[in-house]
Image (cartoon, helix red, strand yellow):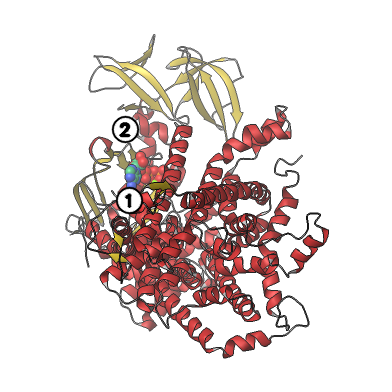
Amino acid sequence: MNPRRFPFTREISLAVMAYLYVPVVVLIAYSFNANRTATIWTHASVSWYGRILENPSIQAAAWNSLVLAVCAATAATLLALLAALSTRRDFLGRGAAETVLNMPLILPEIVVAVATLLLFVALGVHLGLTAMMAAHTAFCIPFAYLPIRARLDGMSGTYEEAAQDLYASRFRTFRRVTMPMLWPGVMAGFTLAFVTSLDDFLTSFFLSGPGTTTLPVYIFSAIRSGISPEINAISAVMLVVSVLLVALSFFLGRLRR
Amino acid sequence: MMHNPTLRRASLLTPAIAVILLLIGVPLCLMGWISLLGKGTSSGVDWASLPSVANYVRLVWEEDFDGTMILNSSYLVIFLRSVVLAAVTTIFSLLLGLPVALWMAGLSRTGRDAMLLLITIPFWTNLLVRNYAWLIILREDGWVAKSVNAISPFGPVQLLYNDTAVAIGLTYSFLPFMILPLYTVFEKFDWRLLEAAYDLGATRKRALRRVLLPIATPGIMAGSLLVFIPCLGAFVTPALLGGGKTLMLGNIIQMQFGASRNWPFGASLSVILLAAMLIVMTAMALLRNRRTA
Amino acid sequence: MTDASVPPAVSIRNVSKSFGKGIYTVPVLDDVSLNIDRREFFTLLGPSGCGKTTLLRLIAGFETANAGTIAIEGQDVTAAPPFHRPVNTVFQSYALFPHLTVEQNVAFALVEQGLAREAIRTRVGEALEMVRMGAFARRRPAELSGGQQQRVALARALAPRPRVLLLDEPLSALDLKLRKEMQLELKQLQAEAGITFLFVTHDQEEALTLSDRVAVMQAGKILQMGPPREIYERPTHRFVADFIGDINLLEGEALPGGGVRLGPGAVVPLTCATPGKVTIAIRPERARLATVGEGTLDATVIHSAYLGTAMLHKLGLPDGSTFLLRQSESSGPPPETGSRVGLTLPGEAIRVLLQ
Ligand SMILES: Nc1ncnc2c1ncn2[C@@H]1O[C@H](COP(=O)(O)OP(=O)(O)OP(=O)(O)O)[C@@H](O)[C@H]1O
Ligand SMILES: [Mg+2]
């Protein structure tokens, strides 16, 4: 009797995996349905993908999302990298610092989003891409921080000592040893921050101004006005992009461990 | 270069902390203040109004046309619905997540890694899109609804835009948050303990209850917190699958910043949501401390 | 050997080190002083936790001493950072950079020293040839066996031609056979490169076979320092005697008129500074068998083992303790188990120990 095997766990697990993935598969399948009334399956076609490529508002929204995600993820990764380097050793107040850094993970996003909206309006900040970039940077920090921290924790300080022993100054040690060894963690952190920003709906929903809609905000308002094959197609694209990026970050995280 | 380690550390740490405090900490404080102010005419807030708790009173009491205060249960109902839906989702997630985590922990190294990736992927994909997928599956003219209606003895059933649809969507959205902490516990679990329990004559059921459950408890608590908290503040799922009928806290907060344009009232609703979340987290922490003490 | 005009390779003066603050202070090194001569193979030997690694880290510059000075070839480096000290370390875990190839690892310090590309290439080639790893230049550390990583770590530390090479238990991760091989190679390398080696181990056999001089440490102090033969044959402390090789320790009483009494009627002719209780030590191979009543003591043979070229006898003494005696084959027939024998303890083979 293997103590690790429990009756029905396998069957339930497979059912749960189906629960998690069947909707995704259905969505992607429907995006290839040629029929306009998305209910009836006629034959496979990629025409809806062609349609979204031609739609100028989708193009604009996609571009906004991309610019936003690149900027926010870059800034968040940079800030997270510095923070991770400084919290490597224990010090008084390290716990408090980590709590603040992880704060965006625990707080309900809708509350943070409306609070930020209130702040920006109170300060007279113009809503739009810049406002979204600032807000996205803040909540992306923990997503970048955690993989970098994990990488650092798994990295023994001996390598840096070895570099200094071999005549590398502190800065040169950072450049030639710390950074290259940390790089997969930094890339994993960047990817996760990028995906988080790219997928974000709520914050952008409250902070986007006229003409600065992001893709998720566009999808939301489109869904509000009814199911359509275009939404299926653009949703499928978003899903696939996220999955690819996360898989990438997963493999980066385990690189040369 | 700075050679004073404290100074160097502070200068590295400050930017990230400052960004989070300025863009999340300060707004939350400001929101607390605004929740005490009155509704503005042109903008959302009347900055000149005197601070009062009127917005919080409004949650429960309503001024009648002749000036007497009468009970207004509509917000209470929504609040309760949010709590109940969050609780139900947590229980569903636990019932589904526990067997999955157990099964995963018994797999080979590659199997576990693959499952881990499969469980994490939904977490990183767009919540909106994933809930939209359920909209497609459950909608009235979809084949699921049609087949259910064909065999339903109660006449046509509405699958969408009700509490059940929201619960399905919420469980679907947050299930990975339950599986991951449970799996972490089981992965570290020393399975020889269970073997020992069997050797001592425990039946499978008893072994599960006496050995495995106590060990799983920290994972269950962590997972429950991770599911309950975001459920309480959910917006996308009830907005899509609740269809304006099954409202949750997140939806009425959004309304105050949209159509109703009563920002101070929206702020007070947000404060309530935060407070509820803090109460649950504190209760959990106390429970955990009592267990370890 | 020591020339007063040439400063020693390493000179440590009254160095103390403790970790922690306030009531959590843990003293690790207590007033350590030592000189290591140029081209010497010097070994720090001691049990786990006695402070060997800490002393090495102080010399390399990874830790700062609470008190005392450290000089390398006459130059005070007490306050210098690791990258300004002309010493290199072979780490116990090797610490080869996983993101660099073998070649790049060995070139690491040479790049920092600002050597020209051509010079770096030749130096890397030489260093890898020296450890016979030339064929592996393009590999990454993860693709090497433990012994090969060990050699690369050596080459990397030797390539910049340090004044002193610090080796912290470099062989402890290797299996016994490879370890013996590497011991020989290390010794050869040191002779070829003409570099001072400061070697750390807790393996006494390794220390004795490799070193020119050995320092035995215990609890942050150096108890005895000297060539292996001296440490082995003339231990000054009970701890040193016990730590290195097999030895018999006997309790006795130093008599005011000279001589040490080991039991009723058993007096060995030794002179001690102060009368009173003493511990004496004698190696198993230095004691001799005699006929009953004619030795220093009488004993019973409890057990004998054949060792190839010698016999090892376990003897029971009158006070109930046991005594090991190694009898070479040439010194007559072995006694039977259970028989009574005499035991001669030659005065020149006995050491009187400090506690
Ligand atoms: N960074 C540190 N902080 C606190 N205590 C330390 C630190 N480094 C070493 N010690 C303590 O100092 C003592 C000596 O450690 P050291 O590593 O020098 O021993 P060692 O002789 O090299 O032992 P081993 O043979 O096990 O390597 C140990 O008791 C250890 O716990
Ligand atoms: Mg050590």
Separation of disc 1 and disc 2 at Cα? 55 Å
Ligand 1 shown in quarter: top left
- Whether residue C180 is visible, yes or no, is no
Q: Position of residue C114 (x, y in %)?
A: 30, 77
| Residue to which mark 2 is pinned | C236
Q: Amino acid at mark 1?
A: Ala
| Residue to which mark 1 is pinned | A96
* Residue C270, above or below C246: above
Q: Position of residue B191 (x, y in %)?
A: 65, 40
Q: Position of residue A57 (x, y in %)?
A: 51, 86
C5 and B202: which is toward the camera: B202
B238 and A41: which is toward the camera: B238
Which residue is outermost to the left? C5
- Whether residue B55 is visible, yes or no, is yes
Which residue is outermost to the bottom? A54
Quadrant of the drawing holding the C terminus of chain C: top left
Mark 1 belongs to which subunit?
A
CB at mark 2 closer than 8 A to ligand 1? no
* Residue A139, above or below B107: below
Label 1: few (<14), some or many (≥20) within 10 Å? few
Looking at the rendered structure, which numbered label has been put on residue B165?
Answer: none
What residue is at 22 percent from the left and 68 percent from the top? B1
Query: Do marks 1 and 2 both belong to one polypeptide chain?
Result: no
